[in-house]
Image (tube, rainbow, N blue to C red):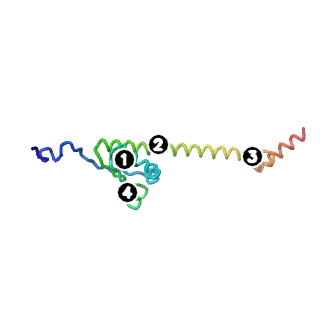
Amino acid sequence: SVSVQALGGRVPNVPELVTQEIRIPADMVGCIIGKAGSRITEIRRLSGSRISIAKASESEAGERLFTITGTRENNEKALYLLYGQLEAERDRRLIQQQQQRQLQVAAAAAAAVASSAPGGNGDMGSIVSGHESLMEEH
């Protein structure tokens, strides 16, 4: 029989496990974990890798350490899924920020229109009464 040493320390047909660590911004960890752990469970299932997440108290400020253990292929899949989730969340947050800015601009424009209307103090009632007084004149 062939010894394990003759094979370079590897057991035949047993995939080599690799451990990788990545740091994820603390404010993004929730989007990876998902409600009741649903997203991280799915990433683990799809990738076949073991993924552990350091507790916030064990992590450096602002980041959480993720440890991924599996075959190279499984870890690549896990990383792809993790980074995909981060990218989707980043895009979602950017869209949300843009929508909030648009609402602020619209509110500011509405306030400017209200304050420049007859009666001029920004009170919607004065706009209505301003229009009523114009109607009475004609």
Q: Which residue is mark 3?
A: 114
Badge 4 or badge 3: first in the primary sequence:
4
* Viewer-closest of 16 and 63: 16
Residue 85: quadrant of the picture = top left
**Tag 1–tag 2 contact (CB < 8 Å):** no
Badge 1 or badge 2: first in the primary sequence:
1
Direction right: furthest residue: 137
Q: Amino acid at mark 1?
A: Arg
Q: Is residue 91 left or right of residue 106?
A: left
**Tag 4–tag 1 contact (CB < 8 Å):** no
Direction bottom: furthest residue: 57
* Viewer-closest of 26 and 104: 26
Element marked by disc 3: helix
* Viewer-closest of 89 and 135: 89
Q: Position of residue 111 (x, y in %)?
A: 71, 47
Q: Position of residue 48 (x, y in %)?
A: 33, 45
Q: Which residue is mark 2?
A: 88
> Residue at the location (29% across, 47% down)?
70
Badge 2 or badge 4: first in the primary sequence:
4
Element marked by disc 4: loop
Q: Amino acid at mark 4?
A: Ala
Badge 4 or badge 1: first in the primary sequence:
1
Q: Which residue is mark 1?
A: 44
> Residue at the location (10% across, 44% down)?
2
Q: Which residue is mark 4?
A: 54
State the separation of the CA atoms marked 2 and 4. 22 Å
> Residue at the location (37% across, 42% down)?
80
Neighbour class for label 1 at 10 Å: few (<14), some, many (≥20)? many
Direction left: furthest residue: 1
Q: Is residue 58 left or right of residue 138?
A: left
Q: Amino acid at mark 3?
A: Ala
The quarter in which the N terminus is drawn is top left
